[in-house]
Amino acid sequence: MEKRVYEVWKGSNKFILGGRLIFGPDAKSLLVTLLLITVPVIIFCVFVARHLRHAFSPYNAGYAILAVAIVFTIYVLILLFLTSARDPGIIPRNSHPPEEEFRYDSSVSAEVGGRQTPSLQFPRTKEVMVNGVHVRVKYCDTCMLYRPPRCSHCSICNNCVERFDHHCPWVGQCIGLRNYRYFFMFVSSATLLCIYVFSMSALYIKVLMDDHQGTVWKAMKESPPSVILMTYCFIALWFVGGLTGFHLYLISTNQTTYENFRFRADNRINVYNLGCPSNFLEVFCTKVKPSKNNFRAFVREEVPRPTLQSIQGAEAEDLGGGDPRPKVEDDLEIGEDLLKISQRRNIEEIDEDIRSRGSNGPAHTALEVDAILDSDHRAPTIRSETRHSSWGRRSGSWEIATDDVLSNSKVTESRSYMTGKEGRQ
């Protein structure tokens, strides 16, 4: 049965509605954020806005206060949904490293099995051009790709995210290229909502003071929910208001939270800064790029391609075994070549010995030559041992003991020498 992309997704994200909505692994914290928004608004509508319906002229003008609170809260929740339930700009993983980046460095070689082999090098960084300036990008081992500029790997979601800003636990999602605009609008709208609730609660306290001709303390005793809402909104403003101001600064300078905290002390030149007006236009007036992931698509079976490990070598059992016969045959042919070389060398030495002695000693008979050659035609010793390949692999194979072959040639030389010595005697 074919599976869809979201069913075999390697990141830590959570999907609902058949992969149509994507959340971070901490999506449960989104429920806390929903409660922090909706509960105060419900209290406001029930205990404050409801009593302000007829507090202004015309008689029903106060309904606008209730309507604005409800509509504005729905708007904030929609922005929260657009921030947390969409792809923030995840870059799809590669199934294998970019092989075009492999290179062989002959200057750095490793001696394996008595042979020098070139070392396989893989650059961890490379430089790309951004606005006429060289920018170094890093290789991600998890996603097996070179991260584009301003991209970073989120350790919580386990994904590489374009224009990574930060991972926000309050929305349960990474903030990146495709949802940063909605995140800022959510934070700034939440700030305005806090200001609105705080202002209307203070207004209700003022109305109670005018109606009862009392002090502010008596009015506060008349409406404890108003006091609670004012206190809550005052505290919340320090968080969402401060966050709004901070991101206004980041947008004006075209920075991300990640870049600001990591490279602030480096005094780097910001190659992405286009000027304050252009920076705001880039964030709010450009078209949101489509997602690079189709989470509902069916997974395609890719043809296995050699990876870095398969190039450098793996254990024979990890590869499921293989047919060792081609290698055995190659090794036997090498052994036979070595044997022929040693035989040819012995024959040449015998002929040279005969010519040098001439008539001074008895010549070798054909029977003696045949006996010498017969000793060289003995089967070479073959033993089973571990062979080292050019990449450092170890695999069981048959290899001819060249030391035995050479020792046979030395014995032959010794015999020919003894025979000549006896003839002279």
Image: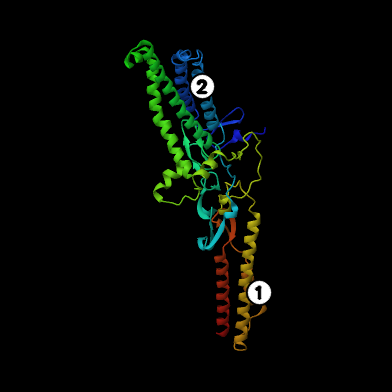
What's the residue type where badge 1 is placed? Asp
**Percent position (x, y) of residue 149?**
52, 48
Q: Which structural element holds mark 2?
A: helix
Going from N to C along the chain, the mark reached first, 2 or 1, is 2
Q: Is residue 408 above or below residue 309?
A: below
Q: Nearer the viewer, residue 347 or 150?
A: 150
Mark 2 Cα-neighbour bin, 10 Å: few <14, some 14–19, many ≥20: some
**For residue 328, which quarter of the picture?**
bottom right
Q: Which residue is mark 1?
A: 370
Q: Nearer the viewer, residue 245 or 236?
A: 245
**Percent position (x, y) of residue 253?**
46, 45
Which quadrant, please, contains the C terminus?
Answer: bottom right
Q: Which residue is mark 2?
A: 68
Q: Is residue 208 above or below residue 161?
A: above
At 62% across and 71% down in the image, what residue appears?
Answer: 341
Q: Which structural element holds mark 1?
A: helix
**Percent position (x, y) of residue 34?**
48, 24
Q: Is residue 83 visible?
A: yes
